Every structure is written in structure tokens, then in C-alpha cells.
Amino acid sequence: MPCYLVTYELKQPRHRYVEFMRELKSFEEWAQILDATWAVVSPLSAVEVRDHLWQFMDPDDGIFVIESGREAAWQDVRCENQWLRDHL
């Protein structure tokens, strides 16, 4: 199943973002990589992941979803290194 990197910019701290965070955690597998960057595993396409999450965002927010590739490097991330090795 594909793993997608989701990065976003929430312009205003609003109560609705609680729902957005809940939806990020609703994917089959997920990990928070940095403050506003997550990896999610889903059978959905990148467009479908974006559209699903967009429902819980405000019109002035931004979101970027890309299917992970074969090569990656990281340092001092929030999630476990092994999770990234297993899913990216």
C-alpha cells in the first residue's frame, strides 16, 4: 500500500483543526515526521488523500501530498526511524 507524505500550513489556530488532526490519525498507518509533516499509508490516491483532508481545513490553508519514493534521508524527526524505514 502506498505511503504519502502530507505537509500542510494551517494559517489560523481554530478549533476545527482538532478534526484535521484526528483525520490524519485515522489512516491505517501514520507517523508525524515534523510539526506539519506526516506520513500516511493508504490505498487512496494522492488526490483522494488531499481531498479527504481538505474537508477539515480552512480555505486559506495549504496542503501538499506526494507518494513517497525510493530514497529518503532524515535527521532528528518526531517518529521512530524504523517506522520510516518500513514505510517510505
Image: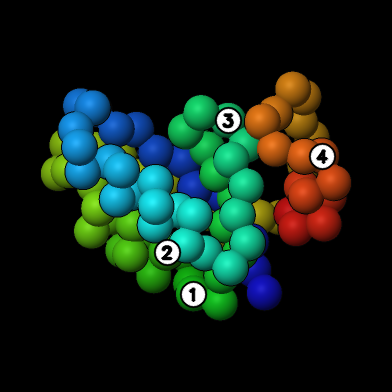
What residue does disc 2 label? 49
- Amino acid marked by disc 4: Asn
Compared across the picture, whether 11 is left or right of 63 comes to left
Q: Secondary structure at mark 4?
A: helix
37 shown above or below 31: above
How many angstroms separate mark 2 from mark 3 (CA)?
19 Å
Q: Bin the neighbour count of mark 1 within 10 Å (Cα to Cα): few under 14, some 14-19, many 20 and up.
A: some
Contact, CB < 8 Å: mark 1 with mark 2?
yes
Image coordinates of residue 78 in percent, x first then y, are 66, 31
Say whether disc 2 or disc 3 marks the residue closer to the N-terminus. 3
- Amino acid marked by disc 1: Leu
How many angstroms separate mark 4 from mark 1 (CA)?
24 Å
How many angstroms separate mark 1 from mark 2 (CA)?
6 Å
Image coordinates of residue 3 in percent, x first then y, are 64, 61
**Viewer-nearest of labels 2 and 4?**
4
- Amino acid marked by disc 3: Leu
What residue does disc 1 label? 44
Say whether disc 1 or disc 2 marks the residue closer to the N-terminus. 1
Q: Secondary structure at mark 2?
A: helix
Q: Secondary structure at mark 1?
A: loop
**Viewer-nearest of labels 4 and 1?**
4
How many angstroms separate mark 4 from mark 3 (CA)?
13 Å
Q: Which mark is residue 81?
A: 4
Contact, CB < 8 Å: mark 4 with mark 3?
no
Say whether disc 4 or disc 1 marks the residue closer to the N-terminus. 1
Q: Which mark is residue 22?
A: none
Q: Which mark is residue 34?
A: 3
Image coordinates of residue 47 in percent, x first then y, are 39, 66
- Amino acid marked by disc 2: Val
Say whether disc 1 or disc 3 marks the residue closer to the N-terminus. 3
Say whether disc 2 or disc 4 marks the residue closer to the N-terminus. 2
